[in-house]
Image (spheres, helix red, strand yellow):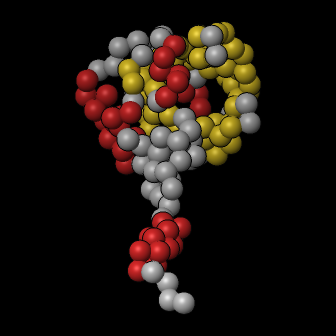
Amino acid sequence: MRPRPTILLCLLALAGCAGAPAATGFRDGARQISSAAAFDPRRFADVWHVAAAYGAEARCGPLAETLTLTGPGRYRVTGTACGPKGARAFLAEARVSGPGRITRDGEELWVLWTDADYRVAVIGTPSGDFARLLSRTPEVRPDLLIAARKVLEFNGYDPAGLVPL
């Protein structure tokens, strides 16, 4: 018995999908991602406001965190995070795990970019499950916001999905 052309076409279409990389989270997993090699852990310490984020985190409103250096490449992190019932306080330990990479709560966050004066930063994960735009102040200068969106796009994130907080 010969296969029907419609069935054969469907099987070929499915086989073609098997080799295509799938998008993960908010990021195209087929795109390269890079962390900031010139990252300075001391300059990164202090207060950061979450100026924009992806996904459910964006529904919580204003969020912030303070990173306090506790030793070489180690931080105590306090602040507010988005929980199931809205914003909640948190305390965590974090450590620099590589150039522009910080491990917190078992997850490696990549600092994708900071401006030269550490006024804004873009952090995310290779999985694409998480990305944020951080700012030293609640408001982000328009030119720095444009630059941050370009960094997200370069690293495979859809900048249109970034929601201001």
Q: Quadrant of residue 141?
A: top left
112 vs 73, nearest the viewer: 112
26 vs 95, nearest the viewer: 26
Q: What x and y, as percent, mark residue 61?
A: 47, 11
Q: Quadrant of residue 135?
A: top left
Q: What x and y, as percent, mark residue 43?
A: 53, 27
The residue lying furthest to the left in this view is: 143
Q: Is residue 5 above or below residue 160?
A: below
Residue 57 relative to residue 152: left or right = right
- Residue in the image at 33% along x and 35% along y: 160
Residue 105 relative to residue 99: left or right = right
Q: What x and y, as percent, mark residue 137?
A: 41, 13
**Residue 155 visible within the image:** no
Q: Is residue 83 above or below residue 98?
A: above
**Residue 84 visible within the image:** yes
Q: Is residue 34 above or below residue 67?
A: below
- Residue in the image at 52% along x and 24% along y: 56
The residue lying furthest to the bottom in this view is: 1
Q: What x and y, as percent, mark residue 81?
A: 60, 16
Placement of the C terminus among the 4 image quadrants: top left
- Residue in the image at 31% along x and 28% along y: 145
5 vs 17, nearest the viewer: 5
3 vs 161, nearest the viewer: 3
The residue lying furthest to the front in this view is: 1
The tally of labels here is 0
- Residue in the image at 25% along x and 23% along y: 142
Residue 75 relative to residue 9: left or right = right
Placement of the N terminus among the 4 image quadrants: bottom right
